[in-house]
Image (spheres, helix red, strand yellow):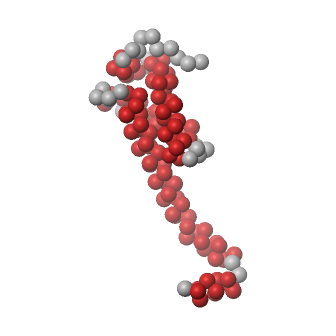
Amino acid sequence: MKPQDPTYGTDKELVKAILNADRQAFAVFVDRTENLVAKIVFQMTGGSADRKDLVQEIYIKAFRNLDGFRFASKLSTPAMILVSVRKCIIILRRRLALFYSLIPILTGRIIKLMPQSTISSCILRR
């Protein structure tokens, strides 16, 4: 069931209500931005299994930084795009670092599993 937002006409009113611990206001905020955030996360992470956790982390970060929102732009677009993209970049960097840290381990195992003649022929080709 989608939350109704009869009293939160402007972004300023919505942010003020969220900062005053209005759960309904936060539900409206999520409702207004969830399609955008989900699309960004899906496109940047390739639909990974942890995308729901990532979306949740994005909303937590947005909530924590909401008191600094300057209303120079619409709350639902540039601000959430920026938070979403930055969080996805952090996750992608972590994955890349993990991948690069595994390369020596994986290549060592592959070499150990390869027959000696194959290893020798690979070395001689260089």
Closest to the observer: 102 or 11?
11
Left or right of residue 81, residue 48 in this image: right
Residue 19 place in picture, x, y as percent: 37, 22
Q: Residue furthest bottom?
A: 124
Compared to residue 53, the image places residue 33 above or below, namely: above
- Residue 64 can be seen, yes or no: no
- Residue 48 can be seen, yes or no: yes
Closest to the observer: 14 or 64?
14
Residue 100 place in picture, x, y as percent: 51, 63
Which residue corresponds to the image point at 69% horizontal and 78% vertical from the top-left?
A: 114
Quarter assignment of residue 75: top left
Give the total number of marks visible in the rendering. 0
Which residue corresponds to the image point at 43% horizontal and 42% vertical from the top-left?
A: 85
Residue 55 place in picture, x, y as percent: 51, 36
Compared to residue 65, the image places residue 5 above or below, namely: above
Which residue corresponds to the image point at 35% horizontal and 27% vertical from the top-left?
A: 74
Left or right of residue 56, residue 16 in this image: left
Which residue corresponds to the image point at 52% horizontal and 17% vertical from the top-left?
A: 3
Compared to residue 78, the image places residue 116 above or below, namely: below
Residue 62 place in picture, x, y as percent: 41, 33
Query: Which image quadrant: the N terminus?
Result: top right
Quarter assignment of residue 2: top right
Query: Which image quadrant: the C terminus?
Result: bottom right
Closest to the observer: 94 or 72?
72
Compared to residue 74, the image places residue 87 above or below, namely: below
Left or right of residue 22, residue 112 in this image: right
